[in-house]
Image: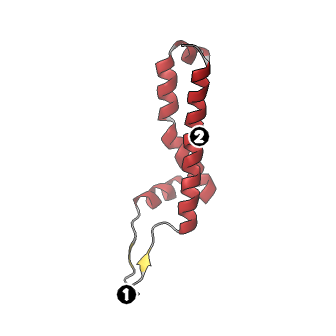
């Protein structure tokens, strides 16, 4: 922790939590080789019927992308857990 955040625990925790969405987006984008616009486009995507092939579904995310996203989400959550563990080691 830097000097400012060591003085204000609430600021330190809030800042760390606020970084979570950006960290998650960066992890997923790097792992999946997506740009930021692609990340948000994929996030808005929905599975839908293929208009050219009845009975087929156009998937928004492939199975490999879903696996990668879950893996990166676990990494982001672990970063928060590690941060909280460090707080437990310090006296308030």
| Residue 1 seen by the camera | no
Badge 1: few (under 14), some or many (20 or more) residues near its Cα, within 10 Å? few
Q: How far apart are marks 2 and 1 (CA)?
A: 42 Å
**Residue beneath disc 2:** 78
Discs 2, 1 touching: Cβ within 8 Å? no
Q: Where is residue 77 in the image (x, y as percent from the top left)?
A: 54, 41
Select label 2 or label 1 by which is in front: 2
Q: Is mark 2 on a helix, strand or loop?
A: helix
- Residue 47: image quadrant is bottom left
Residue 54 circle label: 1
**Would you say residue 80 is visible in this rendering?**
yes
**In this figure, what is the number of numbered marks?**
2
Q: Residue at x 57, y 22 (%)?
A: 88
Residue under the point 55% across and 63% down: 65
Which residue is at the front of the view, 92 or 42? 92
Left or right of 79? Residue 44 is left
On the rendered image, what quadrant is the N terminus found in?
top right
What's the residue at 58%, 66% (across, down)?
A: 64
Name the spot of residue 45 as percent of width and height, x first: 41, 63
Q: Quadrant of residue 35?
A: bottom right
Q: In this orientation, which residue lies closer to the viewer: 75 or 37? A: 75
Q: Say few, some or many: other residues with alpha carbon within 10 Å of mark 2 (under 14 / 14 to 19 / 20 or more).
A: few
What residue is rendered at 52% in x and 52% in y?
Answer: 36
**Can you give x and y, in whole percent of width and height, for residue 22 in the image?**
52, 42
| Camera-side residue of 64 and 43 | 64
Determine the residue located farthest toward the bottom in the rendered image.
53
């Amino acid at each position: 922790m830097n000097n400012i955040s060591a003085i204000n625990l609430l600021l330190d925790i809030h800042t760390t939590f606020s970084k979570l969405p950006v960290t998650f987006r960066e992890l997923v984008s790097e792992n999946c080789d997506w740009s930021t616009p692609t990340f948000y486009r994929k996030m808005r995507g929905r599975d839908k019927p293929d208009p050219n092939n009845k009975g087929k579904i156009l998937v928004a995310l492939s199975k490999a992308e879903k696996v990668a996203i879950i893996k990166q989400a676990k990494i982001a959550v672990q970063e928060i857990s590690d941060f909280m563990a460090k707080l437990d080691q310090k006296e308030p």
